[in-house]
């Protein structure tokens, strides 16, 4: 097996540090601006749309969200892993995916009435038929996204995501004041997708040529078919909550869940996704060196835990106050599913990179098998807990995260020649600090009764931030400084 020396490892570590810093800085910078505006748009939409409207859209977008993952994420990962970015190959992939998306769109149109009947939501038919048209656009996002990933253009990805999201949000807001208010969320999705593709093609100067390389297409398909098999199943799993909630409790309950998901998506976009999108790219650049792969794995895992854990736990502890302050009274039940989703988010540093790691390591069989296990355990756990209501049902999803830690994580650590105790020692500081933070904030709850929501929120945030940072500084300072040096390395 190929190995590399200390100097090369140091250069790799520095390269990883620079990319991580770029991803985080630009995501923080764009989110600081864009998310304020998007949050304002979302709140205005919430005042104009009923929870049932969000629920119907969620049930329709379950299908197109899966298509998006299969059409872009898997395809881009396959290209990045092959390291073939020639225009002919990228064009071939685009047209091959276009043919598949045309067939998929036809199937979804035919299946729309049956799906709407199963969900007891007749209005689903029209929304799903229009929303599925977005799948015809997806192939044209593959080539420019792959090129930006290969060029480590985190700035470009962040800026284009911001601009396209703002364009979609603005279109949705305008539609909400028109006679077609019920189509606001559909318009938002279509405009966001189309504007991102147009901007990405302009930035990368990537326009598909009218040619198909059969050999390049077959090579790409060999990789992407196995990735799709795993990611296709994996992409269904997060939407199981929407489907079961809709089938058992109706569109209104799905609406509450979708709004809660929207709030947790803000955290994912800010704290997790900037790092998640780097796994395949950076690991694919390490060749056969296990040492370099371990460097990437440890740096990204440590930083994700340090940043993401206080975000998820903090949002869960303040869910009642945040929902009461930023959403209309009709959306008060959102606090319940929001808290549960944040609790499940605590497992993110251990479970979020799984599919990317298996893809980068070429473990496609495991990618598929563990996706099946994940889906099976999620459905079983949620079905068992569904008798206790829609909020408690969501907690069944935590069983899948636990199963992945027990069964999938040891396989990854084995491939990286990394001892479980080593990983545990590296992740112990943020997990210990966030546990003390949660205990401190929960102990305050009885003393905050009767206070205005804004006052209670400010106290919780101040105490939580103080306790979390205090524990890290007092007991884990050296470990934290070592992790932060990744961000500061040149």
Image (tube, grey):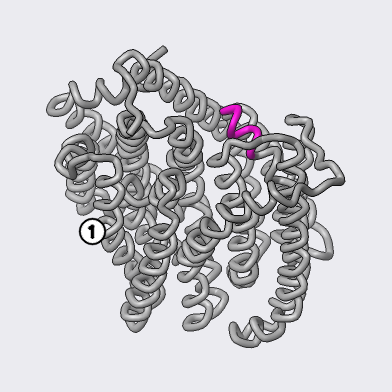
10 Å crowding of disc 1: few (<14), some (14-19), many (20+): few
Q: Which residue is mark 1?
A: 406
Q: Where is 421 relative to 50, above or below?
A: above
Judge by depth and name the residue closer to the eye, 51 or 471: 471
Percent across and percent down for residue 150 are 59, 32
The image quadrant that residue 225 belongs to is bottom right
The image quadrant that residue 154 belongs to is top right
Judge by depth and name the residue closer to the eye, 101 or 5: 5
Percent across and percent down for residue 213 are 76, 47
Q: Quadrant of the C terminus?
A: top left
Q: Residue at x 65, y 87 (%)?
A: 117
Q: Where is 436 relative to 336, above or below?
A: above
Question: Is residue 233 found inside the magenta-colored segment of the image?
Answer: no
Judge by depth and name the residue closer to the eye, 217 or 39: 217
Percent across and percent down for residue 26 are 55, 27
Percent across and percent down for residue 334 are 46, 63
Q: Residue at x 42, y 58 (%)?
A: 367
Q: Secondary structure at mark 1?
A: helix
Q: In screen coordinates, is 81 left or right of 312?
A: right
Q: Please state the extent of the stretch shown in magenta in the rendering.
A: 146-152
Q: Residue at x 62, y 50 (%)?
A: 219
Magenta: predominant secondary structure element?
A: helix
Q: In screen coordinates, is 234 left or right of 106?
A: left
Residue 172 showing in the rendered view: no
Q: In screen coordinates, is 156 left or right of 313?
A: right
Q: Quadrant of the N terminus?
A: top left
Judge by depth and name the residue closer to the eye, 188 or 106: 106
Residue 87 showing in the rendered view: yes
């Amino acid at each position: 097996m190929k190995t590399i020396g200390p100097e090369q490892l140091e250069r790799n570590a520095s390269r990883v540090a620079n990319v991580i810093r770029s991803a985080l800085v630009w995501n923080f910078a764009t989110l600081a601006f864009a998310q304020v505006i998007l949050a304002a748009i979302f709140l205005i939409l919430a005042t104009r749309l009923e929870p049932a409207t969000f629920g119907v859209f969620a049930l329709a977008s379950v299908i197109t969200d899966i298509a998006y993952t299969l059409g872009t994420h898997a395809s881009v990962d396959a290209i990045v892993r092959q390291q073939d970015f020639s225009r002919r190959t990228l064009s071939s992939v685009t047209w091959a995916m276009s043919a598949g998306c045309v067939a998929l769109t036809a199937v979804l149109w035919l299946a729309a009435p049956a799906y709407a009947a199963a969900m007891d939501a007749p209005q689903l038919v029209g929304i799903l038929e229009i929303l599925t048209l977005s799948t015809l656009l997806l192939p044209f996002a593959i080539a420019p996204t792959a090129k930006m990933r290969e060029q480590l253009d985190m700035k470009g990805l962040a800026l284009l995501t911001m601009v396209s999201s703002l364009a979609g949000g603005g279109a949705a807001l305008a539609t909400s004041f028109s006679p077609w208010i019920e189509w606001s969320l559909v318009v938002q999705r279509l405009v966001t997708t189309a504007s991102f593709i147009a901007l990405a093609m302009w930035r990368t100067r990537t326009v598909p040529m009218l040619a198909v390389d059969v050999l390049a297409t077959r090579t790409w398909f060999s990789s992407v078919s196995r990735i799709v098999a795993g990611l296709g199943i994996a992409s269904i799993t997060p939407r199981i909550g929407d489907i079961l909630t809709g089938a058992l409790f109706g569109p209104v309950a799905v609406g509450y869940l979708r709004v809660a998901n929207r709030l947790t998506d803000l955290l994912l976009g800010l704290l997790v996704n900037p790092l998640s999108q780097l796994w395949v790219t950076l690991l694919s650049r390490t060749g056969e060196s296990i040492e370099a792969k371990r460097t990437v794995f440890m740096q990204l895992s440590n930083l994700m835990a340090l940043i993401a854990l206080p975000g998820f736990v903090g949002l869960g502890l303040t869910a009642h106050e945040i929902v009461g302050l930023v959403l209309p009274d009709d959306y008060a039940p959102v606090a319940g599913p929001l808290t549960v989703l944040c609790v499940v988010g605590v497992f993110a540093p251990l479970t979020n990179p799984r599919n990317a790691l298996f893809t980068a390591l070429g473990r496609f069989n495991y990618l598929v098998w563990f996706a099946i296990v994940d889906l099976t355990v999620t459905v079983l756990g949620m079905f068992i807990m569904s008798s206790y209501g829609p909020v408690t049902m969501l907690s069944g999803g935590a069983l899948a995260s636990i199963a992945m830690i027990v069964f999938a994580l040891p396989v990854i650590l084995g491939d990286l020649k990394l001892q479980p105790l080593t990983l545990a020692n590296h992740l112990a500081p943020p997990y210990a600090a966030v546990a003390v933070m949660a205990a401190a904030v929960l102990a305050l709850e009885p003393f905050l009764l009767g206070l205005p929501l804004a006052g209670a929120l400010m106290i919780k945030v101040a105490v939580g931030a103080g306790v979390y940072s205090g524990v890290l500084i007092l007991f884990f300072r050296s470990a934290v400084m070592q992790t932060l040096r990744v961000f500061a390395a040149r």
